[in-house]
Amino acid sequence: MDEPQALASFAALSQETRLRIVRLLVQAGPDGMAAGAIGEAVGGATTSRLSFHLTHLEHAGLIQSRRDGRFIIYSAVYSALAGLVGFLLKDCCQGHPEICAPAIAALTCACDPHLTESA
C-alpha cells in the first residue's frame, strides 16, 4: 500500500459510522452482511445515508459488495485492511523486533483455531 491509498483508507475510516461498518464486517467474516442488516446494526441509518457510507468505504477499497438475489451483500476486504496495518508498521523497529512485538501480538486473530486450542 502506498501513501495515497493509506490516506484514502484513513479518510474513509475517520467517520464514526464508517468505522463501525468496517468493524462490523470484519466480525461478520467472509460471508459478509446484507445492507439492511448493516443499517440495523449501526443504529438504523437511512437507506440513502447508509448507501453513502458503504459507497465511500467501497471506493477506498476497504469493503466489497456482491449481489445475492435481491440483496447486496457487503464484506470486508481483509487484504486491504492488512495492507493498511502493514503500511503503518512497515518501517517499525529499525532492527529491534522487540519494539514491534506488542503490536504484532495485538493483531493475532481471535478466531485462529490454534489460539483456542491452547487457551
Image (cartoon, rainbow, N blue to C red):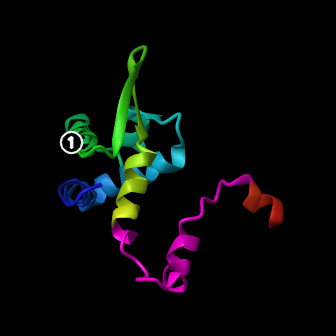
Q: Is residue 94 magenta?
A: yes
Using the image as rendered, state which of residue 103 and residue 1 is in the foreground. 1
Label 1 belongs to which residue? 49
User: Which residue is at 58% across, 72% downward?
Assistant: 105
Coordinates of residue 43 in the picture (x, y in percent)? 36, 50
Coordinates of residue 55 in the picture (x, y in percent)? 23, 38
Coordinates of residue 36 in the picture (x, y in percent)? 38, 33
Q: Quadrant of residue 67?
A: top left
Q: Is residue 29 magenta?
A: no
**As shown in the figure, which amino acid type bears the numbered disc 1?**
Arg
| Quadrant (top left/top right/bottom left/bottom right) for the C terminus | bottom right
Label 1 crowd (10 A; few <14 / some 14-19 / many >=20): few
Q: Quadrant of residue 71?
A: top left
Judge whether 38 appears above or below 103 on screen. above
User: Which residue is at 82% across, 65% downward?
Assistant: 118
Q: Kindly give the residue lying farthest to the top in the view shown.
A: 69
Q: Which residues fall within the magenta stretch?
A: 88-113
| Quadrant (top left/top right/bottom left/bottom right) for the N terminus | bottom left
* Secondary structure category for the residue under label 1: helix
Using the image as rendered, state which of residue 74 and residue 81 is in the foreground. 81
Judge whether 64 appears above or below 62 on screen. above
| 55 relative position to 89: left or right | left
